[in-house]
Amino acid sequence: LFEQIALYSEQFANFIPMSFVLGFYVTQAFNRWWGQYTSFPLPDNLMMAVSGNVHGTDERGRLVRRTLMRYANLSSVLILRSVSTRVRRRFPSLEHVVEAGIKPFFKALLAT
């Protein structure tokens, strides 16, 4: 069956050049990778928004800003654990995330 398909496909080999097909494939693969890369939420923009909008020079304002950024860092770690082998090696389990200090609510979550 494979040989029959190969012989049938050989009739059309001169119509579409192989370099065009490979270029199309590489473009599609790169665009998919780039789309995934640009969809990662980076905490920098959020940090600027939090520091500009959460006011207060007292202890409460500082703690609110710090807690919000811990949540942002936690979400980045959890997202990157699922796609990056380096982050997965650094944080193989949720207990390692807690030990690293990225834990606004994780101790209570792990206790349940």
Image (spheres, helix red, strand yellow):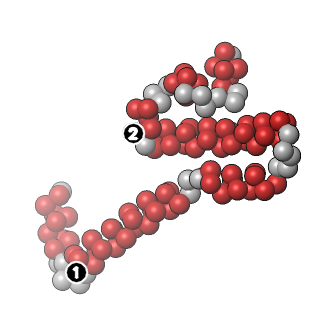
Q: Is residue 94 visible?
A: no
Q: Which mark is residue 85?
A: 2
Q: Which residue bears the numbered disc 1?
A: 17
State the quadrant of the C terminus. Answer: top right
The disc label shown at residue 66, or none: none
- Residue at (39%, 39%) from the top-left corner? 85
Mark 2 vs mark 1: which is more N-terminal? 1
| Percent x, y of residue 111 | 66, 15
Q: Is residue 83 above or below residue 102?
A: below
Q: Tell me the element at label 2.
A: helix
What is the distance, in whole Å, between disc 2 and disc 1 at their CAs?
37 Å
Q: Nearer the viewer, residue 22 or 64?
A: 64
Q: Is residue 69 found left or right of 88 in the rendered image?
A: right
User: Could you tell me the amino acid type at mark 2?
Assistant: Thr
Q: Position of residue 30 (x, y in %)?
A: 39, 65
Q: Kindly indicate the quadrant of the structure image that contains residue 9.
A: bottom left
Residue at position x 75%, y 51% in the image = 50
Q: Is residue 100 visible?
A: yes
Against 100, residue 10 (above or below) is below
Q: Are marks 2 and 1 in contact (CB under 8 Å)?
A: no
Label 2 Cα crowd, 10 Å radius (few <14 / some 14-19 / many 20+): few
Residue lying at the far bottom of the rendered structure = 15
Q: Where is residue 67? Give x, y as percent.
A: 73, 37
**Residue 39 sits above or below residue 76 on the image:** below
Query: Which of these two is toward me, 66 or 26?
Result: 66
Considering depth in this image, is 57 or 21 the residue closer to the camera? 57
Residue at 33% of width from left, 68% of height from top? 26
Mark 1: amino acid: Pro
| Circle 1 SS class | loop
